[in-house]
Image (tube, rainbow, N blue to C red):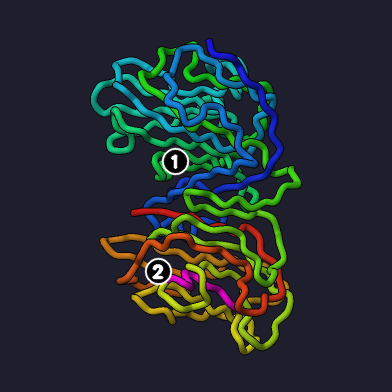
């Protein structure tokens, strides 16, 4: 058995989003129906604890690779997985447990297996959700996971808009999400790869890390993700020339959302959020999107985006109420073989238009606010940028 490592983490991170989650929220419901799949990932050298590095590591029955003194309510688990073959019996991949296979709430927090069967092979993921110690997700791997190929699996529980969301992502595709009303932290969690109760899956893992326990840390609540996901859940003031990070790529299918509370209106274009290739508005993609308050001081938003090849495409919203929170969602989806650009204000669709020139944009800088205009007086919470693909 390999040597056990033990770690503690501070840090802070947040994540978030299928129609099954957010059932009681006004948040992602708005754009969930507009997009097919969401891709996101998370990595930060200051936040993650690496359990297995970049070396190809075989799965072994009963192999403990770490013990976590406390797995918090919020976490992200990520690893790359390479199956050599599949078999007609249960096979364990990774198992986080407070001690047993499935006796107590927290014994599968989570656990990942492959179900019996040669054809229609299913991946099986269990977690403690809604007081069920073995809430199960099972789906055919089909084209998600192939033999003799590397795949990435992420399991996360995140807090957004007062809801804890349990999320499963395979190769960048969100395959399941669910609100967990019985969230909690777990003490003394053992990490197996694989567990002692089932035969080990024939295969390898690498790049296995955990990001754990972010909400109560004093660290900066923004994480710039190599796989193009940004989230800042805390309330922050809109500040001139405030660069939040650089996205490696902003894909054709994406969602940008945030809550905003303006505290003063004045004349002149006032910057809120600007995702850009690097300039104010020189080339297509320099405003994708860009959000300002209207220069007339009325409280209307002006939202620019890269749509139909135009660098000057924009829409205006109705005025936002001063001193009150409003929720903005800007998203692009792929439906019926077309890309659709949409904007929602407080759950109301302002525009939905076909984008005949949707593109991937690399190395996109995210400002809140930008360096070319005065900042809007006010505050933002739950700033979120998600990449997706159809």
Is residue 126 visible to the viewer in this orientation of the structure?
yes
Compared to 258, does 323 lie above or below? Answer: below
CA separation, marks 1 and 2? 24 Å
Specify few, some or many for label 2: CA neighbours under 10 Å numbering under 14, 14-19, or 20 or more.
Answer: many
Residue under the image location 54 percent in, 62 percent down: 257
Residue under the image location 60 percent in, 20 percent down: 190
Q: Which residue is denoted by mark 1 in the rendering?
A: 169
Task: Give the percent coordinates (x, y) of residue 362.
Answer: 43, 60
Q: Which residue is denoted by mark 2 in the rendering?
A: 341
Along the line of sight, which residue is nearer the eye, 163 or 332?
332
Left or right: residue 337 versus residue 361 is left
Residue closest to the far left:
119
Q: Which residues are magenta?
A: 285-292
Q: Secondary structure at mark 2?
A: strand
Task: Give the percent coordinates (x, y) of residue 88.
Answer: 29, 16
Q: Secondary structure at mark 1?
A: strand
Is residue 117 rendered magenta in the image? no
Q: Quadrant of residue 48?
A: top right
Residue closest to the far front:
55
Is residue 349 visible to the viewer in this orientation of the structure?
no
Q: Quadrant of residue 104?
A: top right
Residue closest to the far right:
218
Dominant SS type (magenta): loop
Left or right: residue 191 versus residue 240 is left
Is residue 290 rendered magenta in the image? yes
Task: Give the percent coordinates (x, y) of residue 14.
Answer: 61, 47
Specify few, some or many for label 1: CA neighbours under 10 Å numbering under 14, 14-19, or 20 or more.
Answer: many
* Tag 1 and tag 2, C-beta contact below 8 Å: no
């Amino acid at each position: 058995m390999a040597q056990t490592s033990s770690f503690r983490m501070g840090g802070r991170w947040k994540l978030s989003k299928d129609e099954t989650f957010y059932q009681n929220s006004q948040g992602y419901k708005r754009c969930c129906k507009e997009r097919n799949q969401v891709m996101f990932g998370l990595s930060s050298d200051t936040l993650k604890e690496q359990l297995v590095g970049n070396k190809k590591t075989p799965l072994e029955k009963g192999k403990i690779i770490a013990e976590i003194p406390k797995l918090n309510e919020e976490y992200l688990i990520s690893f790359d997985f390479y199956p050599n073959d599949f078999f007609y019996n249960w096979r364990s991949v990774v198992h986080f447990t407070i001690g047993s296979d499935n006796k107590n709430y927290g014994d599968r927090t989570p656990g990942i297996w492959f179900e019996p069967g040669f054809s229609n092979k299913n991946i099986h993921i269990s977690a403690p959700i809604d007081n069920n110690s073995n809430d199960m997700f099972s789906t055919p791997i089909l084209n998600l996971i192939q033999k003799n190929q590397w795949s990435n699996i992420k399991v996360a529980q995140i807090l957004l808009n007062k809801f804890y969301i349990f999320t499963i992502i395979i190769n960048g595709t969100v395959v399941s999400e669910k609100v967990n009303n019985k969230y909690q932290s777990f003490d003394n969690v053992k990490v197996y790869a694989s567990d002692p109760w089932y035969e080990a899956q024939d295969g390898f893992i690498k790049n296995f890390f955990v990001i754990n326990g972010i909400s109560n840390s004093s660290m900066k609540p923004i994480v710039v993700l190599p796989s193009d996901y940004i989230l800042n859940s805390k309330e922050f003031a809109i500040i001139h020339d405030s660069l939040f990070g650089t996205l490696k790529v902003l894909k054709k299918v994406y969602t940008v959302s945030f809550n905003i509370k303006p505290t003063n209106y004045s004349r002149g274009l006032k910057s809120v959020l600007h995702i850009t290739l690097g300039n104010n508005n020189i080339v297509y993609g320099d405003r994708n999107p860009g959000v300002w308050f209207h220069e007339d001081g009325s409280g209307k938003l002006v939202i620019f985006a890269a749509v139909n090849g135009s660098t000057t495409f924009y829409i205006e919203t109705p005025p936002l109420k001063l001193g009150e929170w409003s929720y903005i969602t800007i998203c692009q989806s792929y439906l019926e073989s077309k890309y659709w650009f949409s904007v929602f204000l407080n759950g109301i669709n302002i525009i939905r238009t076909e984008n005949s020139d949707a593109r991937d944009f690399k190395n996109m800088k995210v400002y809140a606010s930008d360096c070319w205009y005065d900042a809007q007086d006010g505050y933002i919470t739950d700033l979120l940028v998600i990449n997706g693909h159809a």
